[in-house]
Image (tube, rainbow, N blue to C red):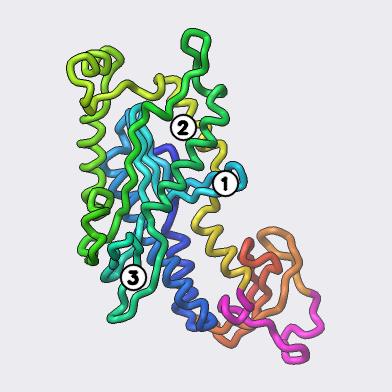
Amino acid sequence: MICKEVSYDLAMEEWGRLLDSCSLPEDQVSVAKAHLAGLKAEKEMAYYLAARFAQHRDLAIFNNLRIKHGGLVAQIDHLVLSRWSAYFIETKSVGHKISINADGQWARVYGRKYKNMESPIEQSRRHETILFDLLESRRSEFMGKLLGMQTTFRKLIDVQHLVSVSVGAIIQGRGKKAVADHLRAMDQIPQMIEDRHKAVAASFMGGVLADMLNPGHTKRLAAFKEKEFDACCQMLLDVDISQTPLEQVHAFIAELPEEAAGLESAEDGQADGEGETAPACPKCGAEMVLRTATRGDRAGKQFYGCSAYPKCRGIVNLG
């Protein structure tokens, strides 16, 4: 089941618009390209998860989950949670190659140049710690007691850290084998989760019998009762502080000069509407500002744009 779905398309269009305008400062072009590539990869991974598990009652999908606890923040690309297991998925857009050396250091490869990057596996392990610390601190709100003592989930839940990469991506370097269990092409991850879920999930009696017959078994007791699991999923939604992808691109635009966002303020004394009173925004009622379009069919023509841009995109065309 999908507990948190994310719309990526509008944000991807906005990043594309910025790049197509050719008006971004040079140092921001690579930032915008990275954001766009990252969103494409996250959208693809979300699609594969939804296609397989949207109707799966045992598995709950959270996309773009951001939580804060103890002054630390975890930004989780995708979390698949069940009563028995948790799968933390870090999505990496890999245009060509990633190199992992013998010390476990990661780098993107551009021709003969190497650009260091943070290990997504270590990043995911931090996310696990922050998320579980948060849930532990509030477990009395969603977990019951056993023999008068507060139950916990941490020792029972099976945790997997996965790094999803584009189909056809090349992973190289001496450290590749050490992280092979964590690396998967995006389209392979749902099957891996399905297989692992079948291997670890057991009923109460099934888990007890498995313990008696084979202490080294993979079958395990559920970390949550059904009602506890539902309450835990709701709590994750309640504590989520993430921005939507569209809000993220708007925040980026808000920090840019107006010219870089594809808009240009009219020069004093040169506006066709000089001396006119600016109208109120037809969408939100805020004060409007006289501007000149720098691209598109109306390039060079003036219009009133909402002063609350990019939060509000109300316009009044002139001429």
Residue with the mark numbered 1: 241
Res 227 quadrant in image: top left
Distance, label 2 to label 3, CA atoms, is 35 Å
Quadrant of image for the N terminus: top left
Mark on residue 167? none
Q: Amino acid at mark 2?
A: Cys
Front: mark 1 or 3: 3
Front: mark 2 or 3: 3
Image location of residue 243, percent across then percent down: 55, 53
Q: Nearer the viewer, residue 188 or 130?
A: 130
In primary-sequence order, the first of circles 2 and 3 is 3
Image location of residue 88, percent across then percent down: 37, 44
Residue with the mark numbered 3: 108
Range of magenta residues: 256-277
Apparent side of residue 79 relative to residue 305 in the rendered image (left or right): left
Secondary structure beneath dot 1 equals loop
Task: Look at the image and say whether residue 263 sits in the magenta stretch.
Answer: yes
Residue 247 appears in the rendering: yes
Image location of residue 201, percent across then percent down: 27, 26
Residue 1 appears in the rendering: no
Q: Secondary structure of the magenta portion, mostly? A: loop
Residue lying at the far top of the rendered structure: 147
- Tell me what residue is drawn at x 41 percent, y 23 percent: 224
Q: Amino acid at mark 1?
A: Ile
Task: Look at the image and say whether residue 266 sits in the magenta stretch.
Answer: yes
Residue lying at the far bottom of the rendered structure: 270
Secondary structure beneath dot 2 equals helix
The answer to whether 138 is drawn above or below residue 166 in the figure is above
Residue with the mark numbered 2: 233
Q: Amino acid at mark 3?
A: Arg
Secondary structure beneath dot 3 equals strand
